[in-house]
Amino acid sequence: MKKVIIAAASVWLMFILQSSVFSRINIGGIVPNMLIIITACFGFMEGDLAGLLVGFFCGMLMDVFYGSFKGFYALIYMYLGYLNGKFCNVFYPEDVKLPLALIISTDLLYGLSCYVFLFLLRGRFEIGFYFGHIILPEIIMTIIMTLLVYPIILFIHKRFYEIKR
């Protein structure tokens, strides 16, 4: 029960940070994707089921507050959390290279899937513009925030969750 409460509080806190604090201090309309960070972290720290569930609830928050298609972000975040959960067996808390690589690739997959399903299928073919002005700056900002937030998430994980090693 404690794990569920901590996961819910983490998701809610990251959503509040992303939607209120960082939306006020955005750079060019781009904010770091804190929900990608928490989804990926729960995935590779706790496994595919935890990543799937945290991703689903992160996506549902995005759908309820910002989505035009209900369930779209929930589905994307759910898949991303599940994919990150597949790296649970090779995750070592002391090594920061795997989390950074996974969060970069997760944010890239998120940006490309949003481009394909929200823009490309509507006939907007400006992938270079979208990549250079939206996807890449969001990845950079997300990585900067990952370097600041990841030690806190790792501390909470070590403190409240059982390390399976």
Image: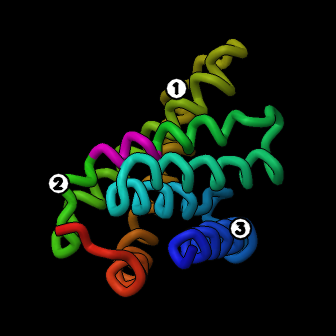
- Mark toward the viewer: 1 or 2: 2
Q: In the rendered structure, which amino acid carries the disc numbered 2? A: Val
**Which element is circle 2 on?**
helix
* Residue at 16% across, 68% down: 165
Horizontally, residue 79 falls left or right of residue 151, namely right
Depth check: 139 or 81 in front? 81
Residue 124 x, y percent position in the rendering: 66, 19
Distance, label 3 to label 2, CA atoms, is: 34 Å
Q: Magenta stretch?
A: 81-86
- Mark toward the viewer: 1 or 3: 3
Q: How many marks?
A: 3
Q: List the residue tagged with mark 2.
A: 90
Q: List the residue tagged with mark 3.
A: 23
Sort mark 1 into few (<14), some (14-19) or many (20+) by Cα contacts within 10 Å.
some
Q: In the rendered structure, which amino acid carries the disc numbered 1? A: Ile
Is tag 3's residue or tag 2's residue first in the polypeptide sequence? 3
Horizontally, residue 121 falls left or right of residue 36, namely right
Is tag 1's residue or tag 3's residue first in the polypeptide sequence? 3
Residue 112 x, y percent position in the rendering: 50, 32
In the image, residue 72 above or below residue 141:
above
On whether residue 103 falls in the magenta region, the answer is: no
Q: List the residue tagged with mark 1.
A: 127
Q: In the rendered structure, which amino acid carries the disc numbered 3? A: Ser
- Where, by quadrant of the figure, is residue 67 drawn? top right
| C-beta proximity under 8 Å, tags 1 and 3 | no
